């Protein structure tokens, strides 16, 4: 990072309450992408996990190792037709036993997904001056670029950068989104809308499969209406190559704080 950029970065962060970001021990605030672009050869101390939390260190744990888990695959297209009951049973089992499953034939086109992955990658390829505009300590901001949930409180950072976007109601937040790279807003808005639709269809099937409102159409409709009015957050995670991958993690074991997470992975 050039001195001029460092000053701009420090001043911007100070306006948002990060008074000590210019101290030498806080240079990890540069974020992972910039560290890698500048040719870093070792992992900064702030990103080094405790030995017990590092990759591969829990492989001797019988609760983790050698389970050969096969996650359920839910074919969404079969919800329409004679196999609906079997699909609902499989969905209920996936929710109760695994809490994680893969959805196929879900209706979001390959073009929409590929465009989303492409424009996300192009955002992280922007110059740091452009990406850095969206760095903020406000976790409720419409747009937030960073590397950790709380860059002032977390003791260890993950080896990743993220871009988080609030998406619902879309007309309220879309004007605050980045306007570069080209077509960013259009592409991400399309994916956000289709992901929201898939979420609602998934939740309708999950509610039915678990018998939460069995034989109660009004109760089911009320639940779905509450879900439709709920918040929607999109996070694009970028994991650059790491010079010492045995010391850190892109993302440690965790539970998302949302109701349901749809994961699109390249």
Image (spheres, rainbow, N blue to C red):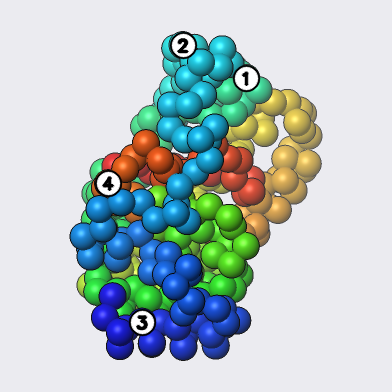
Task: Determine whether 105 is above or below 38 in the image.
Answer: above
Q: Which residue has dot 1 on it?
A: 97
The image quadrant that residue 219 belongs to is top right
Q: Distance between the Cα atoms at labels 4 and 3?
A: 23 Å
The mark that comes first in sequence, 2 or 3, is 3
Count of labels in the image: 4
Which class describes the residues within 10 Å of circle 4: few (<14), some (14-19), or many (20+)? some
Q: Relative to 111, does residue 185 appear above or below in the rendering?
A: below
Distance between the alpha carbons at the discs numbered 2 and 3 = 47 Å
Q: CA distance from mark 1 to mark 4?
A: 37 Å
Secondary structure type for disc 4 = loop
Label ID, residue 157: none
Residue extending furthest front? 24
The numbered mark, 1 or 4, whose residue comes first in the sequence reads: 1
Q: Which residue is mark 2?
A: 66
Q: Can residue 194 be spotted in the picture?
A: no
Q: Nearer the viewer, residue 1 or 218?
A: 1
Q: Earlier in the sequence, mark 1 or mark 3?
A: 3
* Residue at 53% over, 40% down: 50
| Picture residue at 42% right of the left edge, 64% below the top | 28
Task: Report the mark closest to the observer, 4 or 2.
Answer: 4
Horizontally, residue 198 falls left or right of residue 258, namely left
Q: How many residues crowd around disc 2 within 10 Å: few (fewer than 14), some, or many (20 or more)?
A: few
How much space separates mark 1 and mark 3, taking CA atoms? 49 Å
Secondary structure at badge 3 equals helix
Which residue is disc 3 drawn over? 6
Q: Which element is circle 2 on? A: loop
**Is 206 left, or right, of 236 in this rendering?**
right
Kind of element beneath mark 1 = helix
Q: Which mark is residue 243?
A: 4
């Amino acid at each position: 990072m050039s001195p001029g950029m460092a000053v701009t970065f420090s001043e911007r962060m100070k306006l948002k309450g990060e008074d000590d970001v210019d101290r030498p021990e806080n240079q990890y605030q540069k974020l992972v992408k910039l560290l890698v672009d500048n040719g870093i050869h070792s992992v900064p101390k702030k990103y080094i996990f405790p030995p017990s939390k590092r990759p591969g260190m829990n492989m001797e744990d019988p609760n983790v190792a050698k389970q050969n888990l096969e996650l359920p695959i839910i074919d969404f297209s079969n919800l329409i037709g004679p196999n609906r009951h079997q699909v609902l049973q499989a969905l209920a089992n996936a929710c109760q036993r695994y809490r994680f499953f893969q959805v196929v034939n879900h209706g979001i086109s390959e073009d929409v997904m590929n465009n989303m992955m492409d424009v996300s990658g192009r955002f992280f390829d922007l110059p740091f001056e452009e990406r850095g505009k969206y760095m903020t300590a406000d976790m409720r901001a419409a747009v937030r670029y960073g590397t950790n949930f709380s860059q002032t409180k977390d003791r260890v950072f993950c080896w990743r950068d993220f871009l988080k976007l609030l998406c619902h109601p879309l007309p309220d937040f879309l004007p605050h989104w980045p306007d570069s790279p080209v077509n960013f807003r259009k592409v991400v808005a399309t994916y956000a809308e289709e992901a929201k639709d898939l979420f609602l269809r998934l939740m309708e099937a999950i509610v039915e499969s678990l018998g939460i409102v069995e034989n109660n159409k009004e109760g089911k409709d009320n639940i779905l209406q509450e879900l439709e009015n709920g918040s929607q957050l999109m996070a694009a995670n970028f994991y650059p190559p790491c010079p010492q991958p045995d010391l850190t993690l892109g993302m440690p074991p965790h539970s998302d704080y949302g109701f349901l997470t749809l994961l699109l992975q390249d």
